[in-house]
Structure formats: structure tokens, C-alpha cells
Amino acid sequence: MTGNLLGSALMVLSMIGFGIEDAFFKSATQTASPGIATLVFGATGFVLFVGFSASSRESVWPRALLSGPLLWRSSFEVAGRLFFALALAFAPLSTTSAILQAAPLVVTAGAAALLEERVGVSRWVAMAVGFAGVLLVLRPWGEAFSPALLFAVVAMIGFAGRDLATRASPSSLSWRQLGTSGFAMVLVAGTLIAVFEAERVLPDARALMQLLAAGAIGVCAYTALTHAMRMGEVSVVAPFRYARLLVALFLAFLLFGERPDALMLMGAALIVASGAYTLVRSGQRPRIAV
């Protein structure tokens, strides 16, 4: 009981951290170009995780990171980070965060299709409800549709693929080594964005501080997430990951003046409800990914 309580509290703190990280990054891209911002953010997290591994006297880049599942994980990580950065820069924070919450549903579907995990009828129904919620958020049928939201959809698929590949990764890798690998892929994503940017704009002093803070807070949030999943039962702790959406909605309203309408909120509620149900029913302890 104590483990579940502490794990749930750490999960909520982790999601608050990730929400603040996203808000800092979005704010910084109002003056800095997305590619340069991603590079600064990635370099901050990379240096911190390398320092953690060095202080633990473990290999910063073990050979296992070059195994098949980890190479797939890195590829999906690059795609997820690249398109998430573009979504934060060009799409509303609230809708981007809502779409991102569908990643566990895609992971469950992928695990059934690729890893031959058993998924019952009730979870397939829950996934269908969640994907219907994504359509309500996107609304590709009318004037409310924003093409920039497709960045968020591709990012969500990238993160889901990363988490799926992490399940098959060697258990010998520590969270510090996975974090180092993850932020190394952020650097790759930032480089790719910067190469194709028409204009590369360096961050001013304010944006630079926001990006450095985003990287540091992101690393702290990831550490809290790792400990949360190790302390409590996954069926109890994991659903609290949806606190990230509440934080995003609040910060989007407070900092960027975003006011989601009823359909968007309804879609977000469907995604959260179906995702939480899927996590509780799965009852499995997933490998943590940054």
C-alpha cells in the first residue's frame, strides 16, 4: 500500500514535470527555431544522463544499445522527438498533449500484433473508443482541422513504437543508459529539423534559460517516472500518467490563451478513459522509456 501511494505521488510529480517541460519548450520556440531549440534541449538532457552513468561507474554507451531492438527503438525515438518538437512549435499545446495520450493504446495494439500478447475483447473495444477520441480531437472533416496536428499524430506513433521496442530491449540496460540513448536521439532529431529549416534562429537569453530548464526538468521527471513504476503496482500507478494532460490543459490556458472546445475535451476524456482502462487491465510492468 505504501509503495502504491508513493509510486502514484511520484507519477503525478513526473507528469507535472513533463507538462512544464513541454510548456517551456513551446514558449522557447516562439523566438528560437524548432531545430535549434531541440538541439539545446537534447544536449542538456544528454549531458545530465551521461553524468549519471559516469557517477554510477557504468558504461555510458554499452554494446547492447546497438542490438536490433535498441536500433528500432532509436529510430522510433528520432521520429517521435522530431515530430513532437514540430507539434509543440506549430500546434496548440492542449491538443498535442491530448493526442499524445493515445500512445499506450497503440502500444497495446502493437504488442498484440507484433509480440503476440493476448488482448481480450474488452481492451479492443477500449482501444476503439480511444481512437474515436483521437478523431474528435483532430476533426479531419471540417474547418477546425489543423494540418499541424498531424505532427502530433506521427509523434504519438513514434513514441508508441519506441515503447514497444523498449519492451524487447535487453534487461541489462539501466534507466540511465536508456536515458542517454533517448536524448542522443533528440540530438539527431534536432539536427534533422535544423538541416531543413529555412531560417535557423538562435535562442535569446530568455529562450535559452527555458530550454535549459526544460532539459533539466525533463530528466528529473523521467527519474521520478522510473522510480514510480518500480515502487508500485503498474495497474495502480500507470493511470496517473494522464495527469500530464491536466497539467498541459492548465498551462495551455494560463500561458498561451488556449481554450479547448467541448468536442476536444470530449475526445480527450475518451482517450484518457480508454487508456486508463487498458493500463489497468494489462497489469504488466512495462520497461520505462524517456
Image (tube, rainbow, N blue to C red):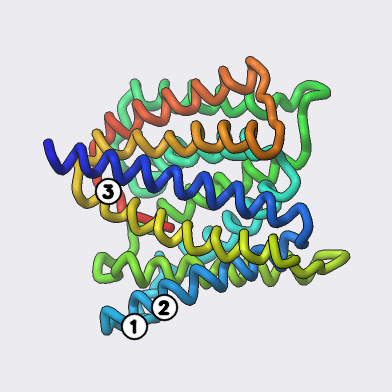
Q: Is residue 74 left or right of residue 65?
A: right
User: Does the CB distance between marks 1 and 2 fall below 8 Å?
Assistant: yes
User: Does the CB distance between marks 3 and 2 fall below 8 Å?
Assistant: no
- SS class of the residue under badge 1? helix
Residue 263: x and y, percent? Answer: 64, 17
Using the rendered image of the protein, determine whether residue 72 is visible from the camera's viewpoint: no
Q: Please state which of residues 4 and 161 is positioned toward the viewer in this rendering.
A: 4
**On the rendered image, what quadrant is the C terminus found in?**
bottom left
Residue bearing the label numbered 2: 50
Q: Residues within 10 Å of mark 2 (few under 14, many from 20)?
A: many
What's the distance in space between the residues labelled 3 and 1, CA to CA? 23 Å
Residue bearing the label numbered 3: 228
Query: Where 8 sits versus 49, above or below?
Result: above
**Amino acid type at image mark 1:** Ala
Residue bearing the label numbered 1: 54
Residue at image coords 68%, 25%: 259
Q: Please state which of residues 166 and 34 is positioned toward the viewer in this rendering.
A: 34
Residue 51: x and y, percent? Answer: 39, 79
Using the rendered image of the protein, determine whether residue 66 is visible from the camera's viewpoint: yes
**Amino acid type at image mark 3:** Ala
Q: Is residue 146 left or right of residue 159?
A: right
- SS class of the residue under badge 3? helix
**Amino acid type at image mark 2:** Val
Residue 205: x and y, percent? Answer: 71, 67
- SS class of the residue under badge 2? helix
What mark, if any, has residue 275 been given in the picture? none
What's the distance in space between the residues labelled 1 and 2, CA to CA? 6 Å
Residue at image coords 60%, 71%: 187
Q: Earlier in the sequence, mark 3 or mark 2?
A: 2
Q: Earlier in the sequence, mark 3 or mark 1?
A: 1
User: Does the CB distance between marks 3 and 1 fall below 8 Å?
Assistant: no
Residue at image coords 31%, 55%: 226
